[in-house]
Structure formats: C-alpha cells, structure tokens
Image (cartoon, grey):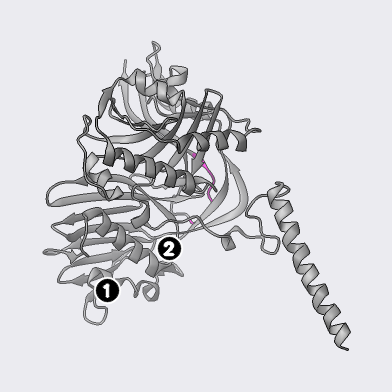
Amino acid sequence: MKKERIKSILLIMLIIINLVLAEKILVNEKLWLSGYNFFVSTRNNRKKNTALVTASLSMPEKIIVNTGYQSSRFIYTRASENFSSINSTASEVIKSAFRDAKSVLQISAEDWYSVLTAKSLYLNFSCSFTPDIYESFLGISAIELPISEFSDIVIGENGNVYLGGNDAYCKIPVSSSLISPIIQSAAEEHTDEESIINYSFDLNFDKNSGDESTVLSPMILIYSEPVTAFTVIPQNPAERDGQVNEKALSAILPLFGVNKSSARSYTEADGTLVYVENNGILKITPSGILTFNARGNGIKLQAGSDSSKIASFIDTVNGKMDIDADICLTLAKVSVDNAHFEFDYTVEGYPVKYKGTHAFSATVKNGYLTEYSQILRHFNVTDNQSISPDFIQALDDVIASYRGSMYEMRITKMYPAFFDRFSGEEIGIDWNIDVDNVLAQ
C-alpha cells in the first residue's frame, strides 16, 4: 500500500514537471504565442501590462529602436514585453544627463534627423513638456535648456541625450554604455521582421511637393504594412440596464465630497445622475461620462506637485471603479497657481480616442481640484485580431475628403488607435489622423 502511494506521488510529480517543461519549450521556442494560457482561452484572464498614473507620468507612449539602417527600426509600445526594461534604462540615462550635464547645446534639425538615422533610442510622448514639468516627473532639479518645451527624446548609442519639439532641438552631451546593448538586442530579437518603419522626413513627406500636396510632420512614423491588434470591447462600469448604476458609484462619491445621505440629488431627462453639494456639482451620464465642477475652492488634494496630486486622484478613482487600463498623459499646462492635465486610455499599447475630447481632464488651482471629467471605461481584450487599413490608403482617404479645393494639407499626427464611439460594440485598430489646416486654392 505504501509503495503504491509513493508510485502515485512520483507519477503526479512527473506529470507536473512534464507540463512545466512543455510550457517552457513551447513559449521559448515560439511554438505558440508568449502569454498564451493552455487552460484559459480568453485574453481577459491574462496578466495586464498596466502602470499607475503616478508611476507613468514620465513614461513615453512608445519607444523606437533605431539600428542605423532605414529598413531596420523596431517599435515597442507599453504593451510590449521589453518596454519596461528599455524605458527603465533610458530613464536612468536621461536622469544622469539632466543631473550631471556640464553643458547643453542647441542643434539644427539636420543634426536631430541624423541621430534618428543612426543607432539610437527614440522616446515618443503624446504630450509636450516644459523642462520644469518633465523634471518634476523625474524627481530631479531643473537644468537650463535652450528650448521652451519638447515632446521627443532621443538617446544616441554613446549616451548623448537629445530633446526636440516645435522645430527646436538641443543636445545634452553625456556618456553611457547602457544604450548600445539595447540596440544590439533589439536587432537580434527582430531578425525575421518584415515590416519597415520610416520617418516622414526619410521619404520627404514633410516637404511641399507642389499642387495639391500633403505635408506630414517629420516625426510621423510611416508603416510599410498594416497594423495588427486584438479587438477591444469598451464597457461602462457605471451603467446597468441602461441607467446609471448608483451602487457601483457609491465608492467614489466621497472622493468628490459627496455625502450620499445628505447631498441633493436628481436625475435629468436623459438619465444623467446629478449630486449637488456645497463644494461642487457631480454628474454621471448613462454612457459613463463623469464630470465635476467646483463651487467655491473645490476639493483639497494631497500634498505634492500638481501632477502627482492629480495622478494620485485618478489612481484612487480607478481603483474604486476597478478600472485597470493603462493611461497616457496627453496635455500638461502648469502656471504659478493653476494646472491643467488631460489623459487618454491606452489598450494593447495603442491609445483609445474619443471624438472631440480626451478620456480625462483635470484642473487644479492652489492645490484644489476645481474641474474634473472622466469617461469611465473597462476594456475587455478579445482573441479576435483586427487589421488596420494600409497607411497610404488611410492617408489617401483623408486627402480625398478635401480634394478639389485643397492646395496644401498639413498633418500633425498619424498613428494607430482604437475609437470608442459609445456603442459598446467590439472595435478594431484604425488610424488617428490630426489635420492642422487645409489651405484652399
């Protein structure tokens, strides 16, 4: 009996070992996708790559590794496996440059482009920063820079840090051996990569070419192949049976100074729930749009910089509503006694866009939250893949909508994104295109 029990235990152990070894072989040898769970078929049960807003203010939206060859560049989004480690190393180099720089040099656009065509890391942000704001995110003291703001950072193979924005560029001469291994590793990791990434300036798309021309911002990434991403289903956690779910919202009401038992509340004709308190008015629509407008000073936030205050507030709201999507800073304006921030959700490494607005908006005055809005959303990632239109086809479609009266069109941004149109339906990846202006003939 004892021998039979020992045999059973050994058999169970062997089965477990075999399963573990099989999983390692299948994943390491790429026999199925990394992250695939043999026992679970839905992506919603997999580990999510989500960062708290407080920890991601200085984090780029994506990182491009330039290997020195125009046909060999690789994109890492926030959902990419190696994004965090690459960003952590890049942040270390940037902090060192900002702290220890003995000089800062203003450079030309040509110098800037030459770094991007050489071996380097390009950190692309969805927001422009003043030096003071960015340095507050890093938690270091300010250095004098010859440019007023920047939205792009490039780190050369030798460690030099370059900042760019609004057609102004500068270089912080430093030395680091940390970047070269990243570039080498990326090149080895993507040996079978077929898609080619160009910058707009590579192909002279940033220059006027005559009648009915379309000019793209020089830093726009041009993809040779359509973008593939799993589809997403946006869900409103504040809704139930077509009405605002008061029970789900009860946890966040105190954050806005609302005492549910004493606040005056009513429901508008469209189903919007309204709470009126001495310090402000809170509204939540059936579609999940939350807005707060202060009466008087507003809501006192915790100590710290304005950016850290609002980031912590968003993290608290999301925690109460069980919202775990990644969030990316898209606007930061700070003055002596006033600060305004806007954010967007990011799912599967791509931003989620809303027509005419951002997912989050917050205004802080003298340490008090005076205005706040948030589109409350969960995002369920499916196992269904979506494929974007071809880059050139998407560009042609936009041009066609203005053709006939157009002399020149200027496009400031073009990138893959999801579009939440409040339908609750499954959505796939598409192109977001921002047109700055169209000059008529």
Of 196 and 29, which appears nearest the observer?
A: 29
Mark 1 neighbour class, 10 Å CA radius: few under 14, some 14 to 19, many 20 or more: few
Residue range (magenta): 424-430
Q: Secondary structure at mark 1?
A: helix
Asked if residue 420 lies left or right of residue 98, the reply is right
* Residue 55 appears in the rendering: yes
At horizontal 12% and vertical 48% (from top left) the residue drawn is 336
Q: Residues within 10 Å of mark 2 (few under 14, many from 20)?
A: some
Is 181 situated above or below 370? above
44 and 164: which is toward the camera: 164
Residue pictured at 72% horizontal, 47% vertical: 29
Percent of width and height locating residue 96? 33, 41
Front residue (pair 303, 373): 303
In the picture, the quarter occupied by the N terminus is bottom right
Going by the numbered disc 2, the residue's amino acid type is: Ile
Question: Residue 52: x and y, percent?
Answer: 39, 58
Give the residue number, with chain letter if any, for mark 1.
Answer: 254
| In the image: residue 21, left or right of residue 67 | right
Q: Look at 25% across and 54% down and name the residue there.
A: 362
Q: How many marks?
A: 2
Residue 235 point in image, percent of width and height = 47, 60
Task: Give the CA separation, mark 2 to mark 1.
Answer: 18 Å
Amino acid identity at mark 1: Pro
Locate residue 397, reporting x and y percent: 48, 28
Query: Which residue is disc 2 drawn over?
Result: 323
- Residue lying at 22% horizontally and 72% vertically, measured from the top left: 257
Q: Is residue 311 left or right of residue 198?
A: left
Quadrant, the C terminus? top left
